[in-house]
Image: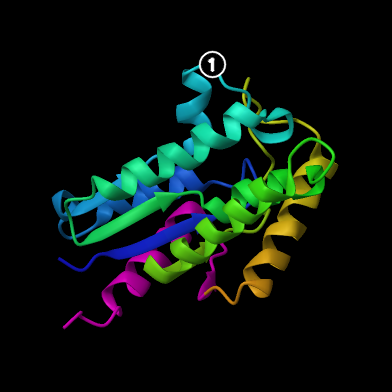
Amino acid sequence: MDHYFITVTGAHGVGKTSLIEEVTAHAASPEDISVIREPAREIAKRGFYVNDKISLDGVFEYLGYCLAEVRQVQTKLVLTDRSILDLYAYTRDQFPHRFSYSLEKLIVEQIHAEKHRTRLYLYLPIEFPMEQDELRPADLDYQAYIDEVIRELLDHFGMPTLEVRGSLEERASKVLDAISSLPETA
C-alpha cells in the first residue's frame, strides 16, 4: 500500500498537535488516518531530555521512535506531528560541540528518507502566544530562532511545503482541502 505522509512542522508551541487533532476530528473518514504522535513528548515520557536540552540518547530515541512508527503505519493517510527536520533544527547548532559529525550525517540522511515518503510538509508559523508546559522552552526568542531555522531547512532541503495560517478552524479547513486535493497513487 502506498501511504500519503503529511508532516506538520514548526517551532514548539505553534499548534501542531492541536491542528492534527482538529483535522482528524473533522476528516470524512478519521478511521482511515494514522497519526504519528510528537516524538519529543513520547521520548520525554521515557525519561529523555528533548528540545534545547536534548542528549545524545535523546537524539537516538527520537530517531528510533520516528522509524518504528513509520514501519507500523496501516492506513493510506498518515499525519506526522513533527519531522526529523525539526530534530535537526533543535540540534544543528550543537554539531560538533555536543554531537559528532557522524550523527549529524545520520540525521540528514533520515531527513532525505523522510522527504522521499512525505507528500506535503505543513509549516505552522508563530501566530499565537505559546502555552507554557513542563516540556517546551518558555523563551520566546528561542522559539522565534527555531521557527527561523525550520523555515530555512524546509527551503534548504526543498521540501514540498504549504504554510498554514489562521485560527485553528481555518488551519484545519486548509489542511483538509490540501488532503482532498492529493493525487491518488497508482
Q: Quadrant of residue 184?
A: bottom left
In this image, 102 relative to 110: left or right?
right
The residue at 57%/64% (across/down) is 165
* Residue that carries the numbered disc 1 in the rendered image: 47
**Residue 17 in the image, given as x and y percentages of width and height:** 46, 43
Above or below — where is 161 with respect to 69? below
Q: Nearer the viewer, residue 146 or 66?
A: 66
In magenta, the rendered stretch is 160-186
Q: Residues within 10 Å of mark 1 (few under 14, many from 20)?
A: few
Q: Is residue 24 rendered magenta in the image?
A: no
Q: Is residue 171 rendered magenta in the image?
A: yes
Above or below — where is 112 with respect to 104? below
Which residue type carries mark 1? Gly
Q: Is residue 44 visible?
A: yes
Q: How many numbered circles does the render carry? A: 1
Above or below — where is 37 with respect to 45? below
- Label 1 secondary element: loop
**Residue 96 in the image, given as x and y percentages of width and height:** 82, 45
The residue at 67%/30% (across/down) is 54
Q: Quadrant of the N terminus?
A: bottom left
Q: Quadrant of residue 27?
A: bottom left
Q: Nearer the viewer, residue 41 or 92?
A: 92
Q: Residue furthest top?
A: 47
The residue at 27%/74% (across/down) is 180
